Image: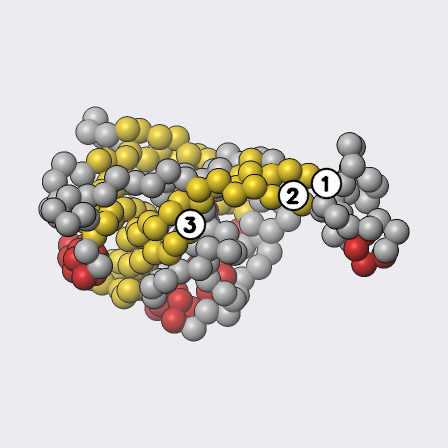
């Protein structure tokens, strides 16, 4: 396999995004930026890949990933403060007749197929980022870049921003570049066209300049029995509008 020497640019923008991290069934939270597992899942959708995908995930684990968030600007050219996460309340399994065979399939049950404790209706709270835009850079091999570029432009399954109700409003694939500098220059041009400025960066390095986070979002295995491992990232707030 060729050496990592290509940089894949993804642009993730939409009215809502949700990048789950440490979420439980009742509360589906979101990080303020795309997770590595979410980006890998998006690429799997583009490839039409299902199941464990252990070999592909192992190969992609060496791909360095950086995220940059771009905020809208006000009439004075100053960044607009990030909107708080939107909370959506759901009643899952409510209003169905359990004597009807078809409606009964929609009522939550235990893993053995029995009635859930306290009844079938479950309350959930789901959180979403609002009006966000992110540039994601993936350093990949030439072979990976070719396959992923084709998949993103001709996706097998629908692409979404974390959850299936989060529809992108811009083309996700924004090109393959031979250097990180060329990639970020292109991302900056796209942000300027959209009247957005750099808000913060998330890098896979530990530095003293920002907040260091430990995230359990590196997928080792997808499918029914998902497994993840930790990674350390640093969140760097932008000091000015220049990249």
Bin the neighbour count of mark 2 within 10 Å (Cα to Cα): few under 14, some 14-19, many 20 and up: few
| Alpha carbons under labels 2 and 3: distance apart | 21 Å
Report the residue marked by disc 2. 91
The residue sitting at the right extreme is 99
Q: Secondary structure at mark 3?
A: strand
Q: Nearer the viewer, mark 2 or mark 3?
A: 2
Instruction: Give the color scheme: rainbow, by chain, secondary structure or one colour.
Output: secondary structure
Element under disc 1: loop
- Callouts 1 and 2 close, C-beta under 8 Å: yes
3 or 1: tag closer to the N-terminus: 3
Residue 220 locus on image (x, y percent): 51, 45
- Foreground label between 3 and 1: 1
Dot 1 or dot 2, earlier in sequence: 2
Calculate the distance from the C-alpha at mark 3 to the C-alpha at mark 1.
26 Å
Residue that carries the numbered disc 1 in the rendered image: 121
Quarter of the image for residue 43 reads bottom left
Q: Nearer the viewer, residue 37 or 118?
A: 118
Question: Which residue is depicted at the point 52% across and 56% down?
Answer: 164
Q: As drawn, which residue projects farthest toward the top?
A: 208
Residue at the image point whose x is 18% and y is 38% from the top: 238
x%, y% of residue 195? 19, 56
Whether residue 136 sits left or right of residue 224 in the image: it is: left
Q: Residue at x 18, y 47 (%)?
A: 74
């Amino acid at each position: 396999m060729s050496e990592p020497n290509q940089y894949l640019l993804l642009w993730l923008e939409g009215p809502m995004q949700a990048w789950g991290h440490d979420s439980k069934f009742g509360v589906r939270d979101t990080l303020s930026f795309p997770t590595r597992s979410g980006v890998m899942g998006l690429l799997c959708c583009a490839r039409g890949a299902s199941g464990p995908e252990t070999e592909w995930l192992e190969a992609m684990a060496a791909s360095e990933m950086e995220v940059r968030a771009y905020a809208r600007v006000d009439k004075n050219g100053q960044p607009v403060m990030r909107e708080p996460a939107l909370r959506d309340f759901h009643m899952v399994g409510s209003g169905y007749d359990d004597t009807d065979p078809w409606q009964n399939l929609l009522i939550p049950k235990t893993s053995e197929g029995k009635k859930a404790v306290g009844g079938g209706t479950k309350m959930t709270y789901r959180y979403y980022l609002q009006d966000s835009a992110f540039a994601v850079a993936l350093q990949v091999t030439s072979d990976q870049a070719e396959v992923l570029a084709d998949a993103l432009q001709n996706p097998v399954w629908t692409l979404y921003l974390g959850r299936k109700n989060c529809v992108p409003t811009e083309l996700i694939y924004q090109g393959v570049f031979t250097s990180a500098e060329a990639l970020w220059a292109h991302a900056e041009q796209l942000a300027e066209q959209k009247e957005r400025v750099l808000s913060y960066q998330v890098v896979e390095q530990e530095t003293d300049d920002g907040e260091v986070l430990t995230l359990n979002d590196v997928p080792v295995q997808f499918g029914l029995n998902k497994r993840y491992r930790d990674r350390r990232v640093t969140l760097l707030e932008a000091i000015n509008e220049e990249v």
